[in-house]
């Protein structure tokens, strides 16, 4: 099975180059002002040009207004929207119709019951992302560098398409693949030298660890 890998929170040409060189299937841009990974839509639009024909550009938003979404879509020209807020199934359907773009809806997970929350979105969202619940006091819905018990995802229906996120890095990617066998992986803080600072060497290291983990499983 092909494994999608999304490097999220990109802000520099060097980080983008490392993500593409490693074989990223998706590259993500954060449009949430409180995040250290925030990027201006116009800057994201310039950066995403390197990914055309190589990786899908994902616009990550948190309960964004229609006005801000219009700017994001116009200036960054994403291939997909990622909704990381409290968006309803109706809102997901509205945005899909408005922009003609697929939508990935994010859910915060800490216990098996949290998986049940996807049910109203099945057949509406094109893909899901499962992230860890933010630590108490965090203003960020994601990118906090914390993980959840990935074994929870073993109970998902086989047809659920998703990306696993939250605390993933080169040291634990093997465990993530072994315990959850996800169709996709999303990494952000796990390839940073400081909050919001992507490290090309850590990105390269992450891809090496993915290849090693997959080789081990195949053997």
Image: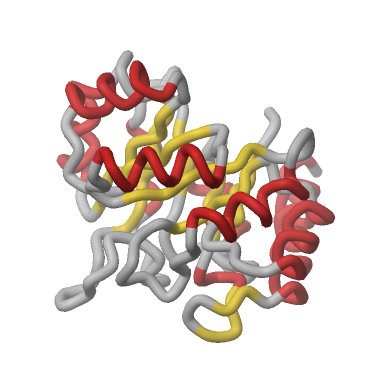
Which residue: 33% across, 32% down?
155
Closer to the camera, 158 or 136? 136
Which corner quadrant of the image does residue 8 belong to?
bottom right
Closer to the camera, 190 or 12? 12
Asked if 9 appears above or below 177 in the picture, the reply is below
Type of colouring: secondary structure
Which residue: 55% across, 45% down?
76
Can the viewer see residue 153? Answer: no
Which corner quadrant of the image does residue 114 belong to?
top left
Asked if 197 appears above or below 143 in the picture, the reply is below
Q: Is residue 57 left or right of residue 25?
A: left
The quarter of the rendered structure image containing the C terminus is top right
Q: Where is residue 90 in the image (x, y as percent from the top left)?
A: 18, 22
Can the viewer see residue 171? Answer: yes
Q: Residue furthest right?
A: 21
Which residue: 60% across, 84% down?
193
Asked if 14 appears above or below 71 in the picture, the reply is below
Q: Position of residue 136 (x, y in %)?
A: 16, 75
Q: Where is residue 157 in the image (x, y as percent from the top left)?
A: 37, 22
The quarter of the rendered structure image containing the N terminus is top right
Q: Is residue 10 left or right of residue 90?
A: right
């Amino acid at each position: 099975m092909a494994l999608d890998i999304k490097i999220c929170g990109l802000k520099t040409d060097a980080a983008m180059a490392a993500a593409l060189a490693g074989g990223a299937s998706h590259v993500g841009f954060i449009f949430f002002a409180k995040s250290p990974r925030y990027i201006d839509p116009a800057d994201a639009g310039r950066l995403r040009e390197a990914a055309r024909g190589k990786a899908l550009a994902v616009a990550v938003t948190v309960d964004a207004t229609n006005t801000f979404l219009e700017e994001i879509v116009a200036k960054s020209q994403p291939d997909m929207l990622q909704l990381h807020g409290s968006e309803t199934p109706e809102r997901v359907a509205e945005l899909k119709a408005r922009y003609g773009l697929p939508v990935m809806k994010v859910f915060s997970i800490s216990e098996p019951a949290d998986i049940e929350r996807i049910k109203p979105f099945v057949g509406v969202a094109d893909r899901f992302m499962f992230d860890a619940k933010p630590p108490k006091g965090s203003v960020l819905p994601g990118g906090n560098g914390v993980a959840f018990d990935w074994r929870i995802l073993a109970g998902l229906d086989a047809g659920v398409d998703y990306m696993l996120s939250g605390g993933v890095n080169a040291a634990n990617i093997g465990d993530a693949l072994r315990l959850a066998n996800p169709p996709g992986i999303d990494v952000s803080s796990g390839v940073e030298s400081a909050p919001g600072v992507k490290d090309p060497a850590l990105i390269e290291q992450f891809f090496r660890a993915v290849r090693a983990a997959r080789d081990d499983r195949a053997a």
